[in-house]
Amino acid sequence: MITPVKALRKNRFKTALIFLSMTVSIAAIFLISAISGGVVSMYSAMLKTDGDIIVTQKGIADTFFSDINRSMTTTIAAMEGVKEVSALILGAAPVDPLPIVGIYGVSDNRFKSYTLKQGSYPKTREVMLGSKIYETLKHPETIVLSKQTFTVSGVFKSRIGFEDGGVVMPLEDAGKLFHKSASIFLISLNDLGQSDAIVAKVNALNSQIEAKTTESFIDSYNQFKIIQTSSDVIGAMAFLMGILGIVSMMSMVVNDRKAEFGIMRSIGLSSGAIIAKLLWETLIIALAAFFVAWGLSEGVLELIEHAEKFQGYINGEITAALLLKVFIVSVVMALVGTLLPAVYASRIDPMSLIQRGGA
Amino acid sequence: MKIEAHALEHYYGAEHILRGVDLSIPSSGFTAIIGESGSGKTTLLSILSTLLQPTGGTVTYDGKALAELGNIDLFRRRNIGFVFQFHYLISYLSLRENVALAALAPEGIDPLMERLGIGRLGSRYSDEVSGGERQRAAIARALINHPSVVFADEPTGNLDTKNALGVYELFREFSNSGTGFIVASHDKKIADFADTIIEMEDGIVKKIHH
């Protein structure tokens, strides 16, 4: 272990370049995965609040486009095993000076899921604001949505960034604003074991609606798939860029240290020993880069979370699972990126040492 | 170990370097290969030491061809030592660590370095010692696994006369203890130390003196 560390210290400049290249790649993977995971988990958490089953318009690509008749909530609420049904309208609109804000129209029975910090739940022509947007808008008494003025009745705190940076209003008012009856219904059950039966019953009510268990909805929701796929593609690009960076830098390192590897070959060190030596060197860099990238990413996520510009909508979290995934990716990146130059180093002809200068 | 060359031929591109060399060298003793630049002595040394594959002909070690020796890296590590014109010590390792890099067992490192007069320099780096001391460290690295034979290519090429004579004296001393030395050099002073002198000219062995 001492020898690789000494070799890295001796080649400080190139070691620093490899370290930087890996740190940037690993941080990029951390950030894109954490942010996309954060978006998915925030929206999932919102849907899971008091929702064991979700009902949307059939065949829609996004819940924002869903339009279902809220009168069906009465029929669903009367079904055996159903504890409660709430209706939501999901929309977005500008709120001066913010270009876009999430607007949530909710049925009265859902207000209780918001923890009030001050004031009261909204009545007609009133809204309550998430604490984040309340701060961003500098404690407004009224807000204007689509040229209509609404009084701010209260402020709530939510751990879900979309809600904390959003506006909640009565379902009827949101319906007038967005010209729809409801976007989704959230059904909570007395017994989760009955979920499949109730899903079937709800689906039988109307051919224009689609009920799914929340888990199944989250697994199959196209928007989540798009976010996840985009994140995977960008992550893969960062991974490849990292590998390319290592390959090119390590190729230069091997070229600079040709004599060293020639000596090793001439004194009988096996090719495997030389390859292992170089792999150790990059693994040490990868380890350092991993921890620095982790710290860096936590810092950037913290900044993003508190940046007014993002209204708390971007709320990434580095989970233990993500840490493990990125750690494995970092190790693989180091090993794959070093392998080719290391194999080249292990094949350096010791003859190149004869009548050549300096190690 | 007896090293034999049979009808060795070697080309670098169109240049005919070795033109049918036949030799039999006992690995014990001190053998010098001398000749002018371009006579083929370095190429011959490289082929005899397994570093270079000849274009034609064969080299055998105790009657066995290279292909029969098994793992060539291990064979080289156990049986052959190298000293080059440049010391080729790894600059980020101390002298002792350079020797240890080649060692199959670490026990002999300190006594050997003491014997070579560099025992107190073990923790120094190559840029902290003199040229002669560097070359002694390179010799220690070549001798650490008690090889049957040490090949040296112009080992005194970068040394002053005093240090060059010191290196030859060391080769002489160790060859008396049973390690063979095969040394390519154009330095005529080597003749005073060698048991056998192979004189090369234009790719052929011109004369062998005992």
Image (cartoon, coloured by chain):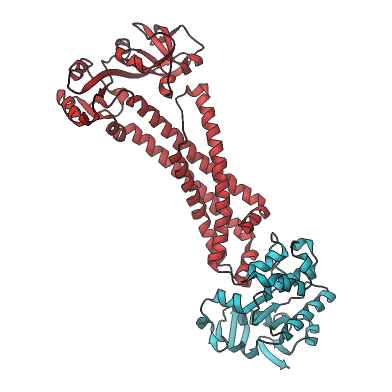
Chain colours: A red, B cyan
Where residue A164 appears, x then y in whole percent?
Answer: 43, 20
Where residue A276 appears, x then y in whole percent?
Answer: 54, 61
Q: Is residue A145 left or right of residue A31?
A: left
Is residue B118 visible from the viewing direction of this image? yes
Q: Which residue is drawn at 66% across and 67% down?
A: B100
Q: Residue at x 59, y 72 (%)?
A: A268
Where residue A169 appears, x then y in whole percent?
Answer: 36, 12
Note whether A277 is above or below A311 in the view shown.
below
In front of the other: B30 or B37: B30
In front of the other: A330 or B18: A330
Q: In this view, does A123 lie to the left or right of B115?
A: left
Q: Which residue is drawn at 49% across and 46% down?
A: A327
Q: Residue at x 17, y 22 (%)?
A: A80
Note whether B73 is above or below A97 in the view shown.
below
Quadrant housing the N terminus of chain B? bottom right
Note whether B206 is above or below A107 in the view shown.
below
Is residue B12 visible from the viewing direction of this image? no
Residue B50 lies in what quarter of the image?
Answer: bottom right
Where residue A289 appears, x then y in whole percent?
Answer: 56, 45
Quadrant housing the C terminus of chain B? bottom right
Say how many tags the image has.
Answer: 0
